[in-house]
Amino acid sequence: MPILYLGLGGTIACTLGPDHLARSTLGAEQLLGQAGRPADVVAEDGGMAASSDLTFADLLAVAARIRRAFEDEGYTGCVLSQGTDTIEEVAYTLHLLQAWPHPVVITGAMRHADLPGKDGPANLQDAMAVARAGEAAGLGVLVVMGGEIHGAAAVTKSHSQSPATFVSPDWGPLGLVAEGRVLIARRPSASPILPATEIRARVNLIRVALDCDPALVEAALGADGLVLEGTGGGHLPARLTPLLARAAERGTVVAVTSRTGSGPSLRHTYGAAGAEADLQRLGILMADGPGLKVRIRLTLALSLSPRPDLGSVLAAWL
Ligand code: ASP
């Protein structure tokens, strides 16, 4: 059964130039060659952008390409390689757009192709093994790096350099790839499907720091939605709440999650101004999960018509 391999640039595709700086130069066909060129995989180039340049429009185009591969071209799995910097956002966006009938697996590399110990070919081989594995279907979009299989909802890049950078903070990886064998240890709970065909909403994200400047929050409120990563269980400085309450009243969706990067936010523990009870009373929604992923859920939800229940979408982080 054929697997489609889409190469999207990133470190896995980088080689050193005459200036000794790494840039994406290797196409999907060359990368497949480094990974043993299996006969059941067809390589296709999807672009060479640094992953920090990707947009939601790019991701909708990738989703459309994968959909066509599964529905019209007989592919039974898809592997995507890209820059690791935004893998967690790409994986989660694709994960929410559709309940994919076959495995969709994303990988990359932390060491470029001209470094000793380059991890790209091994990661690509592991990703192809997962894309072929029947038991990987129905798990949503997966990230395979360093021999581990992570679910899109939980995975995050945790280290700027380490090949073991990808972790799933609350729950750990879903499984492993060992000697090409795919071992799935647990299946994640179902995520909501938010099948946006066009991105119609702009949602900003702010990490709230001690003594956060209200001008920053004010500037961000021009969008359709604002996600704030608050302190601890999802708390804001009380001096920010009047302006957020006014924005919520005018129709901007304001959601608060925790900046800790793991665990849900609170709903009814603390009574201080700026804590969860006060925020909800002012029309601010409590959200669960890292801000990067809450922002994606809210962006897709606000792009749908009719709009799904935002309380459930913002709580659906597992
Ligand atoms: N800067 C690269 C990127 O496009 C980093 C990587 O691939 O790891 O995300």
Image (cartoon, rainbow, N blue to C red):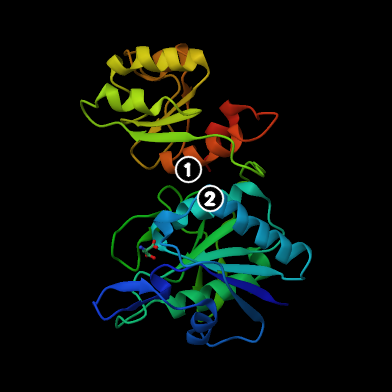
Q: Are marks 1 and 2 in contact (CB under 8 Å)?
A: yes
- Asked if residue 53 is positioned above or below residue 39 in the image, the reply reads above
- The residue that disc 1 covers is 293
Question: Dot 2, how many residues are within 10 Å of its Cα: few (below 14), some (14-19), or many (20+)?
Answer: many
Q: Quadrant of the N terminus?
A: bottom right
Quarter where residue 183 is shown: bottom right
Count of marks placed on residues: 2
Q: Measuring from the top left, give residue 278's x and y in whole percent.
A: 40, 13
Residue at screen point 59% across, 41% down: 199
Judged from this view, the residue extending furthest toward the front is 18
Quarter where residue 42 is shown: bottom right
Q: Of the residues under marks 1 and 2, which one precedes in the sequence?
A: 2
Q: Nearer the viewer, residue 231 or 70?
A: 70
- The residue that disc 2 covers is 92
Name which residue type carries label 2: Tyr
214 displayed left or right of 55: left
Residue at screen point 54% across, 37% down: 299
16 displayed left or right of 38: left
The quarter of the image that holds ligand 1 is: bottom left
